[in-house]
Image (cartoon, grey):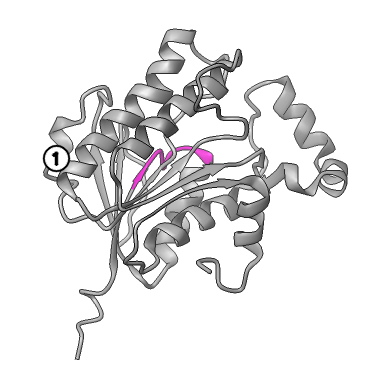
């Protein structure tokens, strides 16, 4: 008889202090098939749970110190990021591209069989020709991840992520989208995704049992379909 604890997934979440990462964390902690959730961030979350392990790490430009904590992991959810305009362009690229690539490098070396779910965004351009920094940098990160050799890689490209719970919106565009969300959702259902639905899809697809190799880019329509499916991993 197989040990049920041994069959549970060990999951890493980066960016759990953010909106999508926070929902991913709560969902993972409530999911029976997840045994341990290791959160890596700069600050403590102020949360306690029997499944939760926290690793403090300040410099994501160098993740070498994470090599040992990342050993034996089955999957990772990477939601680390910053809103456009929140920091200078050079810092924006560093967070969006360099941090992603560096963390992926160490995870891939430490847990060669780990699956990887990456929070990208609609319009990400892997050609590097886009004039929009967000699209260009997310595309650069995607391209690097596809070349990293993960046995299972899931790139999520959501459109407008609805916060679900009220929050202090980062800019005018987000305040406007939140105000018109009920109408916008009815008119353009494939241009929105609730944050909790997105988070569940990112976790579910990463922890499912699959042996074959696959690299999948999931646009907003596909993410919505996953979220509404009775079997989100189908």
The kind of secondary structure element at disc 1 is loop
Q: How many marks?
A: 1
Residue interval drawn in magenta: 13-19
Q: Give whichever of 159, 168 is nearer the camera.
A: 159
- Give the crowd class for mark 1: few <14, some 14-19, many >=20 residues within 10 Å: some
Q: Is residue 114 left or right of residue 137?
A: left
Q: Is residue 186 left or right of residue 114?
A: right
Q: Give whichever of 12, 231 is nearer the camera.
A: 231
Question: Which residue is rendered at x = 62% and y = 35% of the image?
Answer: 122
Q: Quadrant of residue 118?
A: top left
Q: Position of residue 176 (x, y in %)?
A: 79, 28
**Which quarter of the rendering shows the N terminus?**
bottom left
Q: Give whichever of 184, 102 is nearer the camera.
A: 102
Q: Position of residue 188 (x, y in %)?
A: 82, 44
Question: Which residue is rendered at x = 46% and y = 52% of the image?
Answer: 24
Question: Which residue is rendered at x = 62% and y = 30% of the image?
Answer: 123
Q: Is residue 176 left or right of residue 163?
A: right
Question: Which residue is rendered at x = 36% and y = 67% of the image?
Answer: 210
- Magenta highlight on residue 190: no
Name the residue tied to disc 1: 67
Q: Give whichever of 55, 5 is nearer the camera.
A: 5
Q: Position of residue 90 (x, y in %)?
A: 42, 9
Residue furthest bottom as drawn: 1
From what the image shows, is residue 152 above or below residue 81?
below
């Amino acid at each position: 008889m197989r040990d049920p604890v041994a069959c549970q997934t060990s999951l890493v979440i980066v960016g759990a202090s953010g909106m999508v990462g926070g929902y991913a964390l709560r969902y993972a902690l409530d999911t029976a098939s997840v045994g341990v959730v290791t959160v890596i961030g700069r600050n403590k979350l102020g949360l306690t749970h029997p499944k939760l392990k926290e690793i403090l790490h300040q410099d994501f430009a160098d993740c070498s110190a994470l090599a040992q904590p990342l050993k034996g992991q089955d999957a990772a959810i990477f939601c680390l990021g910053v809103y456009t305009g929140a920091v200078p362009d050079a810092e924006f690229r560093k967070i969006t591209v360099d941090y992603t690539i560096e963390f992926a490098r160490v995870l891939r070396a430490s847990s060669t069989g780990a699956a990887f779910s990456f929070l990208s965004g609609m319009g990400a351009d892997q050609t590097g020709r886009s004039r929009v920094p967000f699209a260009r940098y997310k595309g650069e990160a995607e391209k690097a991840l596809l070349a990293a050799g993960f046995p299972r890689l899931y790139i999520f490209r959501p459109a407008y992520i609805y916060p679900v719970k009220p929050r202090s919106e980062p800019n005018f565009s987000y305040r406007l989208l939140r105000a018109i969300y009920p109408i916008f959702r009815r008119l353009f259902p494939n241009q929105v995704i609730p944050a909790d639905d997105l988070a569940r899809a990112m976790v579910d697809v990463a922890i499912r049992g699959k042996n074959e190799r696959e690299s999948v880019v999931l646009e907003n329509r596909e993410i919505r379909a996953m979220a509404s499916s009775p079997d989100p991993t189908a």
